[in-house]
Amino acid sequence: MKDKLNIEIRVTGGDSSLKEAQESLCQEVFGWFGSELPERKVICLLDHADTPELDSNFGNQFRGFHFPLLESGYNILPQRIIEMISDTFTQKDGFETLIYLHHRALESEISIILTLSHEIQHFIQHGNHKKLWTADSLLRNLSNRDSTLGLQKWSDFPSEIDAIKSKKVAVSLRDEQSVQVFADSQIMKFGGTDEELRWNFIRDIPLSTDYEFARELDALVQQHRPKLNQLIKENFPTTEPTRLLNLVGLCGGSSKLSSTTHLTSHHRTKRSHP
């Protein structure tokens, strides 16, 4: 594991034995990623209480998020979360990233591993492959502005599929049967909703899946390029479409920025996830 000074884990609520166990589990998950972790200071918050604003923003199925503090600023976070980490604001070298796990993600070890490793993979995307992250964020922004782009489901975005490496982490740290049982429980719990589709995807994706974030993102941009150019002209009129796509690294070869998820190997804007 990297220098532990780079990662601080805080568990709010619960008794001392629960806090100790969950902190240890989080260290285990961070340790799995090893040298993949960006050289950034992270505060990881496991929250056993309710923050109503989060459910208002993300819905009552949301489980956690990755949030780049320095770029996005603390002020847009709910006041309660700001207060929980406010003591870090005056540190000389403050935290650069927040990884937050909602209490509904803390129901079991498997649940914590799946959610935390998913958010860590987003942390890696943002820290090590910034242009790819920016391109994916641009696609999200434009798809929210125009539904005809046809990118509406979480699985439409390469950053989310890339983060399904969380299944590999959970199987590696525990066992495949535990992952399957937990996924089945979520499918039953959320039958008939988008969450059912999400957990079906997680349960059924083969561990042998080889997913290249850069390749899939580039293919998605090429597929929708005419519509993207139109939307960029409409929404970013002062920037030429090709120039904006160049800025995010997707004109003329994103292969130079390759980020690959091998589910069979040991080496994975605020977004909410399972």
Image (spheres, helix red, strand yellow):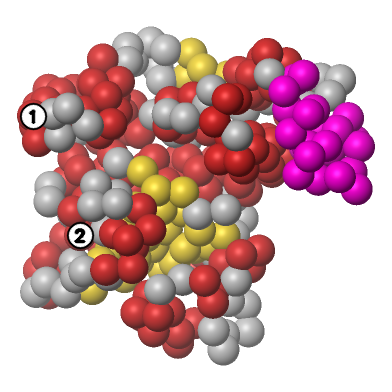
Amino acid on which the number 2 mark rests in the picture: His
Residue at left offset 69%, top offset 36%: 135
- Is 255 on the left-hand or right-hand side of 265? right
For the residue pair 240 and 98, the one nearer the viewer reads as 240
Residue 162 spot, x, y in % from top left: 49, 28
Amino acid on which the number 1 mark rests in the picture: Met
* Residue 102 circle label: none
For the residue pair 122 and 148, the one nearer the viewer reads as 148
Number of numbered markers: 2
Residue 147 visible in the current orientation: yes
Q: Earlier in the sequence, mark 1 or mark 2?
A: 2
Residue at left offset 32%, top offset 61%: 56
Determine which quarter of the picture holds residue 153.
top left
Residue 125 spot, x, y in % from top left: 58, 40
Residue beneath label 2, please? 103
Element under label 2? helix
- Is 13 on the left-hand or right-hand side of 64? left
Magenta stretch encompasses residue 251: no
Quadrant containing the C terminus in the rendered view = top left
Q: What secondary structure characterizes most of the magenta part?
A: helix
For the residue pair 27 and 232, the one nearer the viewer reads as 232
Is the residue marked by circle 1 packed among few (<14), some (14-19), or many (20+) residues within 10 Å?
Answer: few
- Is 42 on the left-hand or right-hand side of 264? right
Residue 260 visible in the current orientation: no
- Mark 1 vs 2: CB contact within 8 A: no
Residue beneath label 1, please? 188
What span is in magenta?
A: 225-248
Residue at left offset 75%, top offset 20%: 225
Determine which quarter of the picture holds residue 132.
top right
Residue 257 spot, x, y in % from top left: 73, 29
Q: CA distance from mark 1 to mark 2?
A: 19 Å
Is the residue marked by circle 2 packed among few (<14), some (14-19), or many (20+) residues within 10 Å?
Answer: some
